Amino acid sequence: MKTKVKTEYQVGVGASSVLMVLVVLALTAVSLLAFCSARNAEVLALRNVEMTTGYYSAAARVQERIGLMDSIYAGLSAQDPSVSTDVLTREFSSLQIAQLQIHETDAGWHFAFVEDAGFERRIMVEGSIFRSGAERFQIVRHQLVSEPAYSPAFEFQLMGV
């Protein structure tokens, strides 16, 4: 009778240890990638919060400045209905508005100024002040622009100056 010799493959202790080390290394790499991704997402979210807060703070300052301009103009026009551009410019200069420009038109004045919104962004505001009528102020532009695209020459070309 012939006896068959069976060959058995046995996995030794060394092979299972190597496999375990590879699994641990793979899990470590995946966990480091997940950690870095979470940190980057946190940084992006914090920057987004700061940018949004900066924009809304600047928008609130714009509204406050326009309100102050309206109250100054209402006081001036109550004293003298024929307010001059020079008087208006002098009175508005006390508000310390960045790059405020005022130009006289047939119906009143056209004004433009900028407000810093942080993160190299500005809010460009443009509007009209009317000499008569129920509506004294009209905002025709309230736009957020990045500073590299911003230039005073470009800004006030919109006013037709």
Image (spheres, helix red, strand yellow):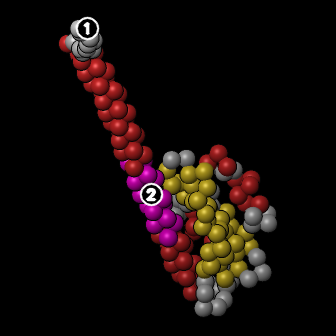
Q: Residue 121's x, y, as percent?
A: 56, 51
19 lies above or below 141: above
The answer to whether residue 14 is seen in the rendering is no
Which residue does the image show at 65% across and 73% down from the upper left?
140
List the residue tagged with mark 1: 2
Please name whichever residue, 136 or 27, is drawn nearer the observer in this view of the structure: 27
Q: Residue 49's x, y, as percent?
A: 40, 54
| Contact (Cβ within 8 Å) of mark 2 with mark 1 | no
Q: Is residue 52 magenta?
A: yes
Q: Residue 101's x, y, as percent?
A: 67, 63
Label 2: state its secondary structure: helix
Q: Is residue 160 magenta?
A: no
Residue most toward the front?
1
List the residue tagged with mark 2: 52
> Which amino acid, mark 1?
Lys
Left or right: residue 116 versus residue 130 is left
Task: Please tell me which of labels 2 and 1 falls first in the chain.
Answer: 1
Which residue does the image show at 74% across and 83% down from the upper left?
107
Which residue does the image show at 50% across and 75% down from the upper left?
67
| Residue 108 figure quarter | bottom right
From the image, give the main secondary structure of the stretch colored magenta: helix
Which residue does the image show at 64% across and 69% down from the upper left?
141
> Which amino acid, mark 2?
Thr
Please name whichever residue, 79 or 27, is drawn nearer the observer in this view of the structure: 27
Quadrant location of the N terminus in the rendered image: top left
Residue most toward the left?
13
Quadrant location of the C terminus in the rendered image: bottom right
In magenta, the rendered stretch is 46-63
Left or right: residue 145 versus residue 153 is left
| Residue 92 figure quarter | bottom right
User: How would you rate the neighbour count of disc 2 (Cα within 10 Å): few for under 14, some for 14-19, many for 20 or more?
Assistant: some
70 lies above or below 144: below
